[in-house]
Image: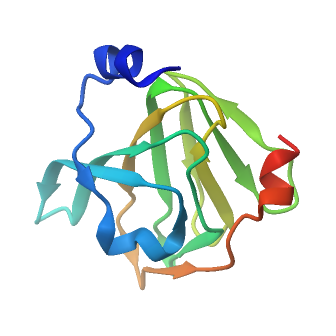
Amino acid sequence: MEKNEFDKVNVFGQGELNSGFAEYFIGNSYLNPLAKIEDAKLSLFNVTFEPGCRNNWHIHHAGKGGGQVLICVAGEGWYQEEGKEAIRLKPGMVITIPANVKHWHGAKKDSWFSHIAIEVPGEETSNEWCEAVTDEEYNKL
């Protein structure tokens, strides 16, 4: 999906360059904060990936609860859990990622991609950033 077409359907907006987490991404990503609910310890972000951009393998640790939910909103992307086949992401899909599962997500090579990321509240939560998804792994998709 080309950028001008993508911008028409990315209803939550691209946001700002994700420079704070750039070291954990191959390519550029962008963050648009949508909501922050302090009492519930819940935040929602629209995350936009340029074509070919993906985040590193990572784990959302939790002693209880936790994990992440992705709601795909525009373009096409990939999601993969360690040891499993990658899943092609399209608008309208919802991916529920349990706590303590190593995974990555990002855009297809030829498409911009956006998803809403929801960190699920839990106890003893932390995020662990792991190794990058190599070009060899990614290019097999």
Residue in the picture at 23% in, 33% down: 13
Q: List x then y, in percent, for residue 87.
A: 74, 37
Q: How is the image coloured?
A: rainbow
Residue in the picture at 46% in, 66% down: 66
**Quadrant position of residue 81:** bottom right
Q: List x then y, in percent, for residue 88.
A: 70, 31
Closer to the camera in the image, 15 or 99: 15
Q: Note whether 10 is above or below 101 in the view shown.
A: above
The answer to whether 78 appears left or right of 123 in the picture is right
Q: Which residue in the rendered view is the most extreme toward the bottom? A: 124
Counting every numbered tag in the picture gives 0
Q: Note whether 45 is above or below 123 in the view shown.
A: above
Residue in the picture at 60% in, 51% down: 105
Q: List x then y, in percent, for residue 134.
A: 77, 65
The answer to whether 35 appears left or right of 139 in the picture is left
Q: Note whether 20 is above or below 17 in the view shown.
A: below
Q: List x then y, in percent, for residue 69.
A: 47, 48
Residue in the picture at 50% in, 25% down: 75
Q: Note whether 124 is above or below 24 in the view shown.
A: below
**Quadrant position of residue 41:** bottom left
The answer to whether 30 appears left or right of 124 in the picture is left
**Quadrant position of residue 77:** top right
Closer to the camera in the image, 139 or 43: 139
The C terminus is located in which quarter?
A: top right
